[in-house]
Amino acid sequence: MATSERTPQDSPPLKGSKEKVAELQRLKAEAMLGGGVKRIETQHKKGKLTARERLDLLLDTGTFNELDMFVTHRSSDFGLDEQKIPGDGVVTGYGQIDGRLVYVFSQDFTVFGGSLSEAHAEKICKIMDLAMKNGAPVIGLNDSGGARIQEGVVSLGAYADIFLRNTLASGVVPQISAIMGPCAGGAVYSPAITDFIFMVEQTSYMFVTGPNVVKTVTHEDVTFEELGGAMVHNSKSGVAHFDCPDEPECIRMIRTLMSFIPSNNLEDPPRITPLDSPTRVEEALDSIIPDNPNKPYDMKAVIGYIVDDSDFFEVQEHFAANIIVGFARLNGRSIGIVAQQPGALAGVLDINSSDKAARFVRFCDCFNIPLITFVDVPGFLPGVSQEHNGIIRHGAKLLYAYCEATVPKITVITRKAYGGAYDVMNSKHVRGDINYAWPTAEIAVMGAEGAVNILFKDAIDKADDPDQRRKELIAEYTEMFANPYIAASRGYVDEIIEPRFTRAKLITALEMLKNKRDSNPPKKHGNIPL
């Protein structure tokens, strides 16, 4: 009787260990090609690196450990069941930057245009969960066409899974986003929640609705670059923090940023061995403030004279230039700097500068980075536009941020500190720890001219020569009140210092405050005036 049973001679030979290892190597090599050689070439022609090339530049050599290389999507609609590529459009894992653990994901535009599927999002969520458990930063390299529309609402839910993790990780581990291609629609909200956004000129863009929708709804013709390019978000919207000329420079800047910040909210920032002398004296600072109180000067030059090796890593350089924020070091210790820029709008506080500084202050407070504030502020920017757009609410954000911060906070008043803006800029009254003033400081309710016009209006009007009398009264008021000594007599200024010694004074104060412990009342969270 015939039988269909196979004899041992008919069975395929079992694979040995060597064959299985060789098969694994082959499958890995295929997975590492992503969408294939042709699509990689197309990526390069656009001036863009591949997902893996970006990670090679970002991480210390040989430290990348990939997770979920063989994950594929689970969708069968629209013929997707015949299009399964290992990795599903994102490379995820962990590695090191300067020997410190980081978790990374890098979207692969060569696979389904980097579109986000359920499986794609699960890979990202997995490394975010690991980052939270292990207290390490998350760095996302974004290059995606958006949601994978073939998966419908599942892809929308997948985005929300990421958004939730972004929110829960906020203030616990640093989150950094680099936009290295398209980032549109719902995809923009994950980077928006993260701490810092890097964008690459000409190849990256972010927007909620694209140019075609904008034209349909508003009849405006606008290009991708004009609507959501790197410089738009770095100079106009304030969405992004760093503008990069190309991808290698973008990645270098991410590594630089990492050198200033800690791995999590329970650690201090990394400290390096300084080469710069802690007692260095800069005589140029004694004459850097112009004799004319209305003449501008460059606050970045002041910062450069004071910080280690004149190395200042500015954040949001192109947005709200009237205030400066960024990272530096003093005697090897990381610090966050907030400073007015007299060369832009006289250094006034307005809506954008208040938002910019408030966000930076809160980041530094989250991650135990001491704050140094250089003050030269004539007040808040007056005007109908500012009032109607909420300068009161926006200015209150900066006030709230300084009041809430418990890290070491040191202030240096270089020249003007007028009105409510004096209070806001880390004054003694909002828990400034050490408040210095230069002898050129003018701490007053308002400038001499404005005060004289109010206080002596009748006397000026009745004078034989009103203009001359006004000048005399301004000079008298300036001599009496436009100085740091009245504030010092009240204890609002701890010490009036010679500018040349500012570096040494700041380093000494930071050392004194290194074990500072302060806290806020127990609460679920505050209600910052958003």
Image (cartoon, rainbow, N blue to C red):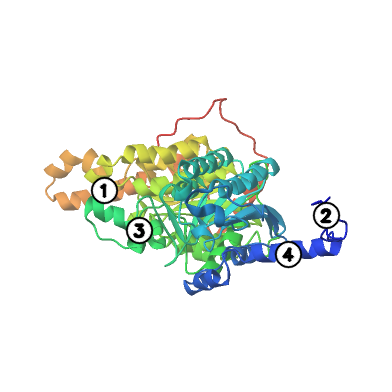
Tell me the element at label 3.
loop
Q: Say whether marks 3 and 2 touch (CB < 8 Å).
A: no
Q: Earlier in the sequence, mark 3 or mark 2?
A: 2
Gap in angstroms between the C-alphas marked 4 and 1: 64 Å
Q: Earlier in the sequence, mark 1 or mark 2?
A: 2
Q: Which mark is residue 344?
A: 3
- Between disc 4 and disc 2, the foreground one is 2
Relative to 276, residue 371 above or below: above
The residue at which mark 2 appears reads as 6
| Residue 340: % across, % down | 42, 53
Three-letter code for the amino acid on which mark 4 is drawn: Gly
Q: Earlier in the sequence, mark 4 or mark 1?
A: 4
The answer to which image quadrant residue 395 occupies is: top left
Three-letter code for the amino acid on which mark 1 is drawn: Glu
> Is residue 501 visible to the viewer in this orientation of the structure?
yes
Q: 193 and 501: which one is in front?
A: 193
The answer to which image quadrant residue 222 occupies is: bottom left
Q: Residue furthest top?
A: 522
Q: 462 and 118: which one is in front?
A: 118
